[in-house]
Image (cartoon, rainbow, N blue to C red):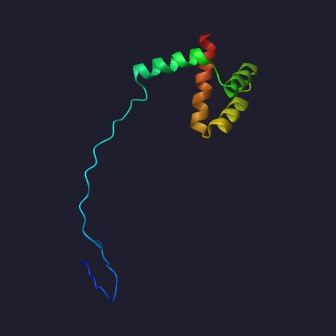
Amino acid sequence: MVRYDVYESIACGPKKGMNTTKIKIPQKRCISKSGKRRSFVKDVIQETVGYAPYERRIMDHIKLGNNKRALKLAKSRLGTHARAKAKRTQLENDMQGN
């Protein structure tokens, strides 16, 4: 039950305030993060442009055997621990592929 007195109090209760109807918003188009075309484009760009300076530093640390230092550098550049671990494993796999 909603109790509402214009001059004495405010609307109170679970259904307080003015009744409104929700506007139906069409769903947005979601873009696949793991699509074939997207992964192909990423590979082409990586081959063309090369690695960023921080990625080269991480690869140097991995070559020297400083995996923990490489993880710390990646975490400081990328922001989160999960992204840093993913980047480190990606660069390790790239180095093993070459």
Residue 30 located left or right of residue 42: left
Residue, x 57% and y 36% (percent of image)?
Answer: 82
- Answer above or below: position of 94 versus 66: above
x, y percentage for residue 29?
A: 33, 36
Which residue of the protein is positioned furthest toward the top in this rendering?
Answer: 98
Residue, x 62% and y 22% (percent of image)?
Answer: 91
Q: Quadrant of residue 17?
A: bottom left
x, y percentage for residue 41?
A: 48, 19
Residue, x 39% and y 29% (percent of image)?
Answer: 32
- Answer above or below: position of 95 versus 31: above
x, y percentage for residue 2?
A: 25, 78
Quadrant (top left, top right, bottom left, bottom right) of the C terminus: top right
Residue 40 located left or right of residue 21: right
Of residues 58 and 23, the one nearer the viewer is 23
Of residues 23 and 79, the one nearer the viewer is 23
Q: Quadrant of residue 92?
A: top right
